Amino acid sequence: METPKQLRAALLSSPGQGHLIPVLELGKRLVTDHGFEVTIFVLPSKASHAEAEIIESAMTPKLLNIVELPPPDLSAVALSQDATVITRLAVMMREAQPAFRSALMAMEAQPDVLIVDLFGTEHLCIGDELGIPKYVYIATNAWFLALLLHSPTLDKEVNGEYVDQTEPFNIPGCKPVRPEDVVDPMLDRSDQQYREYLRMASEIPMGDGILLNVWEDLQVETLAALRNKEFLGPVANGPIYTIGPLIRPVRPAGLEKELLEWLDKQPSESVLFVSFGSGGTLSAEQLVELAWGLELSGQRFIWVLRKPVVKSLDGSFFNVGKGGGGDELLSFLPDGFELRTRNVGLVLPSWAPQVDILSHPSVGGFLSHCGWNSTLESMVSGVPMIAWPLYAEQRLNATLLVEETGVAIRPKELPSKKIVRREEIEKLVRTIMVEKEGHVMRARVKELKTNVEKAVTKEGTSYESLRKMKEDCKMRIHQIKKAH
């Protein structure tokens, strides 16, 4: 039986803007560069208007077939009120499995390959049921993947809580991970999210390979370690394809007239962009300190401002985008802040076209939560960062940016643990925007930008990696058919 000339891929995305964007961009890349026919199955979180807009814009022009799965009924699931984001996402994806299976079976033509994101590893078995190759798409970096795959080993070796350990955790061939940098699911070993995290780690090897949202030159040593069979043994048994960076494209008309005119008037690389991603919020006290820090720095800025969280210092995922108009948001800032900074800064309520702002020549710095999408967008735009990690794997990302790639600085203590005061914020802003250290980082990130531009050309490593995945996929289809 012949392998089909045009491969049909089914991609499954978990809820949330940060998960959805890289899956949609992978889908587009498979269609435009590699001739796939792609259907993307989406489980919407209904958390933000932006998510609905992203889905809508991905359908025009009609490159992709997008199928929205019905939201699962969680009423019969034992889920506590304070269940973490990771737990909620894992449970939602698990409960959506019957609907996903039915939607796949209802397709006019069966897909030739199944690609799921990290939260979709429980669906890999459907690939076996259909007799098709299946892959896991890890939409973040290689260091996170190494920690994830090594976590079942650490689970056996480490006694007590990870955060209480005094020595870093060794991952063969990789930079050790400090206890304070572990990902959120590792913060409490008795919590359900830790069990879900270990389950995902153990299910990844069920796939025929791993797609990773980096390019080959970004993390050479870590990628070499991941590909060393002696390192993880049978844990990562399939190839690792470096296919990134997959980010939203810059839109020529992405900036509103007023914002574009303001940016056009500012000197080159003089504006600091401040945003904490689709799920990032700060406490009211931290908002005030950040406002004072920006004002005291005397630097130009664009600040995407969200309503503060009441209790914790870390971000909020499912509550973002609910309530908080411009006037209400400004009430959380110091009296007279907007008036005093009106000639140097803009405060944008709730949301902004991040890629379009970062790519503007006037932007010279990014105060970011270090979500991987935002990190890639900053690198591709050649913009250095102030790392302000909040949740998920962002502490790991921040350490990578500061200590390995050298394109960011960060506060002395984690913002998720302690309020960062205005004096330190002022110093961080001035360092990144006007001091020599900031100029050095800007030069380094521009080198990365050039490196990225080469990686995604038809002669580049990311293009070649996805082409190789397609060829391996065809071979795997042939093997499966032969075995049956």
Image: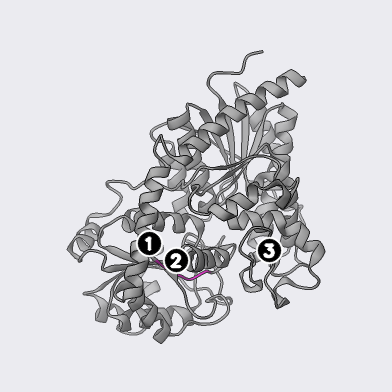
Q: Is residue 79 visible?
A: no
What residue lies at 50% left-to-right and 68% top-to-bottom? Answer: 403
> What are the residue bounds of the magenta stretch?
385-389
Task: Measure how far apart labels 1 and 3 are at the Cα level.
Answer: 32 Å
The answer to whether the residues at label 1 and label 2 have Cβ atoms under 8 Å apart is: yes
Say few, some or many: other residues with alpha carbon within 10 Å of mark 1 (under 14 / 14 to 19 / 20 or more): some
What residue lies at 27% left-to-right and 47% top-to-bottom? Answer: 253
The answer to whether the residues at label 3 and label 2 have Cβ atoms under 8 Å apart is: no
Question: In this view of the protein, which residue sits in the foreground, 161 or 310?
Answer: 161
x then y, percent, for residue 357 = 32, 58
Task: Measure how far apart labels 1 and 2 are at the Cα level.
Answer: 7 Å
In the rendered structure, which amino acid carries the disc numbered 3?
Answer: Pro
In the rendered structure, which amino acid carries the disc numbered 2?
Answer: Gly
Question: In this view of the protein, which residue sits in the foreground, 24 or 180?
Answer: 180
Q: Which residue is mark 3?
A: 185
x then y, percent, for residue 230 = 73, 49
Element carrying mark 3: helix
Q: Which residue is mark 1?
A: 444
Specify the farthest residue to the left: 265
Quick check: 209 above or below 411? above
